[in-house]
Amino acid sequence: MNLFDSVFIAKASFIGVIFLITLGVAAYSTYFERKIAAFMQDRIGPDRAGPFGILQPLADAVKMFMKEDFIPANSNKWLFIMGPCLSMLTALMTSAVVPFGDTITIGDVTFDLQGIDVNIGILWVFGIVSLGVYGILIGGWASNNKYSLLGAIRAASQNISYELAMGLSIIAILMMTGSLSTKAIVEAQQNGHWNILYQPMGFIIFLICAFAECNRTPFDLPECETELIGGYHTEYSSMKLGFYLFAEYINMFISGAVMATLYFGGYDYPGIDFVTAQLGATAATLIGAGALIGKALAFVFIFMWVRWTLPRFRYDQLMGLGWSGLIPLAMFNVVVTGLGVLLDQQILIGIGGVVVFIAGIVVYDQLFVKKKLA
Amino acid sequence: MEISNIWYFLSGLTLLSALMVVLAKNPIHSVLYLVFTFFCISGHYVLLNAQFLMAVNIIVYAGAIMVLFLFVIMMFDLRKNQPESKSNLTKLAGSVVAGSLLVVLIALVRQNNFQTPQVQGFVSQTGMVENLGKVLYSEYLLPFELVSILFFVAMVGAVLLGKREAGERNF
């Protein structure tokens, strides 16, 4: 019973720490989003609240809480409240299977730096991501507003379309690792054998799908201001709107962590053996957790970079890219990976696949596209 | 907490939400209760140590099919297309048919005396991905492939129905 208690306390405190880190990162993502936007547009950005404006997220939170919490007449009250709650819930649940580090020993108890090590790890992520659309759909429908409904329906069809390509790009990883467990996937990538070297095409497909699943520019059509006012959260105010916006930033951070886990070696970093020899296993593990969070933050930066660089797609372009661009490409990637596993030449055939793909596009472009123009 | 208590709680929740699917007035509420029912069934899969089935059930049913259901129902204008309430005679006939089906099912279960699995020698790892995959791709390979052909036929049919025909658009 004593062992159970200490493991329980360790797990609970670990989950609490991850929760706080996620919320802190999400809060400060809003600040850095503005700073990066300002930098890219040659402005200064928020600089009034505290030094360099670093208290801006607090000021925003206070503003959100002080605003009137308005529920429109003729809306479906319970579902209207349920929408943002579901969004937050699904955003926070994904991090349970992300391995933040190897085992750590405090006193005489050893435990994993991972919420739950289930043997279906990556399917868990996939399942929660596919549920993420309910928060938006329910909120958009319950608002009783045509623009909200249109935004919600766009979100639903976009998520369903890009889930397929995402699943197919994950299949290529599973073929190489032979396990669904996120821990096993990370352990297979230790000592620099990161999956990005073996799966460059799979990573690009996954990255594009992650943009679409997070509803970020260039795929932010569910909240396209010029067409839909505010999209699915048009009728929301106060902290309910805050929850929707917050869930988006949490999703960005967690999807960055998932991408680091799947393609960038998880908690692996160069020189891990040296650090273990010098400072001990616990310090090496903690630095590894820091490395994973750093990689996730790098992805958050890429999300913002793309947002302030690219304009958004048109809706038919979005669907065309998903169904007739990414899904066949992901199928091709699965076949190429299978060939690589069969011939035991994974890096060579992975790069060869990319070359064949680019050559194919160039040939297609030369043969067909110009004829159409002429 | 006893594991059987969890089972009773989960079963009660499943039955309650399944009943609410039928009883809810609003079709959207029905769909949401159905989603919840799928979650409860996934909980049962976890109790049976079949985590793979749990994940697939959530991804396929709760994550994809029910989203499409919700999607289609939201597209209808429900105020204009309210289904007219049935007469008492129809309700009575429906209850009689459903009740007799229930009696038949209960009689079937009582007749057959389903065996409970032996506690000794029970392999708890049956539902894990590796074992499931091995069984599916060796022992049940032919049915598995036939099912995939069935799905393929259904997909071709859907594409054929949805395909835009040549000439003027009529919709």
Image (tube, coloured by chain):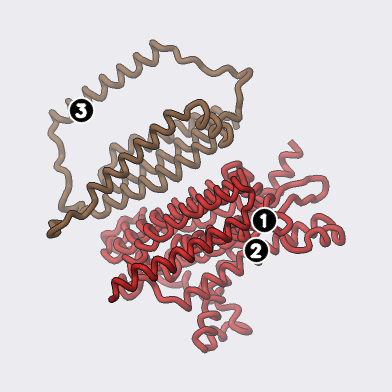
Q: Nearer the viewer, residue A291 or A165?
A: A165
Q: Colour of chain A?
A: red
Which of labels 1 and 3 is toward the front? 1
Q: Nearer the viewer, residue A273 or A78?
A: A273
Of the residues shown, which amino acid type is indicated by label 3? Gly
Query: What residue lies at 71% left-to-right and 48% top-to-bottom?
Result: A112
Question: Where residue A201 appears, x then y in whole percent?
Answer: 53, 60
Task: Indicate which disc residue A293 carries.
Answer: 2
The Cα atoms of the two marked residues, 1 and 2, are separated by 8 Å
Which SS class for mark 1?
A: loop
The Cα atoms of the two marked residues, 1 and 3, are separated by 55 Å
Q: Are marks 3 and 2 on the same chain?
A: no
| Chain to which the residue tagged by mark 3 belongs | B
- Label 1: few (<14), some (14–19) or many (≥20) C-alpha neighbours in 10 Å: many
Q: CB atoms at circles 1 and 2 under 8 Å apart? A: yes
Q: In the image, is residue B55 above or below residue A258?
A: above
Which SS class for mark 2?
A: helix
Of the residues shown, which amino acid type is indicated by label 2? Ile
| Chain to which the residue tagged by mark 2 belongs | A
- Label 3: few (<14), some (14–19) or many (≥20) C-alpha neighbours in 10 Å: few
Task: Indicate which disc residue A100 carries.
Answer: 1
